[in-house]
Amino acid sequence: MHEAFTDVRAREWDTGDGETVRLAVVGCGGFARGVALPAIDECEYAEATVGVSGSADNRDAVVERFGLATTDYDGYAAGERADEYDAVYVATPNRLHLPHVETAAEQGKAVICEKPLEATVGRAERVVDACAEAGVPLMTAYRMQTDPLFRRLREFVADGGVGQVSKLAGDFTFPVLSGSRGPEQWRLDEELAGGGALVDVGVYPLNVARFLLGKEPEWVDGYVRTSEPYAPVDEHVAFEVGFSDALGSFSASFSGHPNAEFTAYGEDGVVRVTDAFQPDRGRRLVVETADGRVTLDGLGGGEVREQFDYFAHAVSTGAAIEPDGADGVADVRLMAAVYERAER
Amino acid sequence: MHEAFTDVRAREWDTGDGETVRLAVVGCGGFARGVALPAIDECEYAEATVGVSGSADNRDAVVERFGLATTDYDGYAAGERADEYDAVYVATPNRLHLPHVETAAEQGKAVICEKPLEATVGRAERVVDACAEAGVPLMTAYRMQTDPLFRRLREFVADGGVGQVSKLAGDFTFPVLSGSRGPEQWRLDEELAGGGALVDVGVYPLNVARFLLGKEPEWVDGYVRTSEPYAPVDEHVAFEVGFSDALGSFSASFSGHPNAEFTAYGEDGVVRVTDAFQPDRGRRLVVETADGRVTLDGLGGGEVREQFDYFAHAVSTGAAIEPDGADGVADVRLMAAVYERAER
């Protein structure tokens, strides 16, 4: 196996001299409580100290389960507990990212903001501007970029592991109405979300493609299908992404059997990841070259903890943050272009 | 496992009363000698009796290896050995299909013609017209439609095995310059082939999608990339196929690591076939539903023998042929539309 895979969990970004960064979690919804906070609990360089929520139930839950101090959105905006955190994790619905980032920036706090960065290109740009003007670090929470598997895969591809990559493909199907989630959720609210399956889950293969190739697309195209109760946002989207020397064909859905996969097709091999994008899932990697077909199971995952440690380490050491605000804006812009094409 | 898979090799089309059909093989190139003739040798209802080729070497080869009588194209057109065959298998470069089909039709012989049916829509329609006017059966040689796996998969999908199918994906990468094949081959000749990777291998996922859903697309879109020595034909193509209730995202290439895969994404499950389109390969099927993930290996293949037995059985019993001329014309028309879109 290629040397990239000999030490899969390598933290090549970790200088060892990071210090603990105290986080306020702004927005204590299902993902924050179920995925982010448990991951932060396991972090080396980050700890959650404050939970911000408009829901008394959610505030109670994070007090009880994670021992956080809490406040509501007004309290947060007023700086009520600002001396209890060094950085802010924004995990609200997309269209509410901007005001919470602006608050953090005004308080001089570093920011890690969920993707998509905002609901529109203009607002995403304002997120970046707010942090730049305040001189605070901004990370877009692209957890796949801190997933050990995808970091190793990038090294493998950059090292010519599959030769020149000519095609990419991927799908992320997240049945948004499964479990206890009903049609009234914000992900189906065009205003709050800024889109449907594309912005919520299609952004994963899109960002991973850009991350893996280290290149920006030259064009996109898109096709949307939707039905009740998903309409007016996209239930299904298929989109094409044209790089200078590669074509990407991606899809995303809010309905259907759960699925997450990513494939890169090269001159000398194919790499395929299944269970690719679900939080903290052991991923399966199949590498096929002239040497044969190798399957590696259980790689990756743990990427949410890695994400918060990566962010906290960068904030405390002053290191550059790779999934920065510009990275987040780029995807919002590309996704807006996909929707524009889909409307024709 | 679903009952469709309990008797994978079922020949539900086989009434048991077919009689042997003698075939002339028109065009004795690499595929005919390496794949088709060995498969016909194993057939129950078909036997090859005559080989037609413009190459003395290829005529000698089929005499020696398969014991055929032979003639050249002039001899075939003149009906030289017409009393030694009942049907004609046309396996020449695409743009030469029409004259050979016309000859067969004039001789009153049933026809099985390689895909794509011809190099242009107009010529493909003339293939169909020639057979219709002469009253001879015409089959487009869509061997995947006689692959046991894809027949079972169609039953499984039709029976709701994965629920409503909302997305399809597939890739066929065939490194056309691998082995002894140089850039002078007819597959890279725009006039003779009628296109590049799309018509030669992209037609596989396209036809399988139509076969599996039993529906016709409402629109297509396409993107082409090419380079020397493939230009002017397409080295890489990505194409979208819009069905009334499903989006298909497919790709095909003449360069890159060999790959063949097909996936159907449904409301209640996902079915994925790898090693999907190569001739006579044991295929891998992964079926994922709420019940879990089942992998079936070694299914399928043998589809070339199945194809000739299916054809011969239909010809001798007068049964309807499913992959008929209209099926072949439909793909030529869709692929022309993909190229038209790609030119914009």
Image (cartoon, coloured by chain):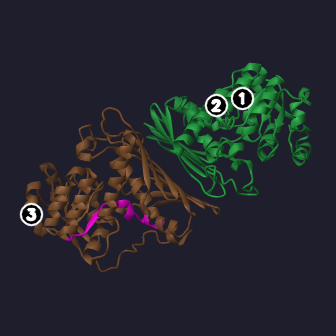
Chain colours: A brown, B green
For the residue marked with disc 1, what is the amino acid?
A: Val
- In x, y percent, where is residue A274? 48, 53
Query: What chain does badge 2 belong to?
Result: B
Seen at 78% across and 32% down, the residue is B99
- In x, y percent, where is residue B210? 56, 33
Q: Which residue is mark 1?
A: B127
Q: Which residue is mark 2?
A: B329
Q: Residues within 10 Å of mark 3 (few under 14, many from 20)?
A: some
Q: Earlier in the sequence, mark 1 or mark 2?
A: 1
**Residue A332 lies in the magenta stretch:** no
C-alpha gap between disc 1 and disc 2: 9 Å
Q: Which residue is mark 3?
A: A79
Q: Are marks 1 and 3 in contact (CB under 8 Å)?
A: no
Q: Residues within 10 Å of mark 2 (few under 14, many from 20)?
A: many
For the residue marked with disc 3, what is the amino acid?
A: Gly
- Tell me: A79 left or right of B250: left
Q: Is residue A112 above or below residue B293?
A: below
For the residue marked with disc 2, what is the amino acid?
A: Val
Based on the displayed image, in which of its 4 quarters is residue B307 positioned?
A: top right
Q: Are marks 1 and 2 in contact (CB under 8 Å)?
A: yes
Which residue is at the front of the view, A306 or A329?
A329
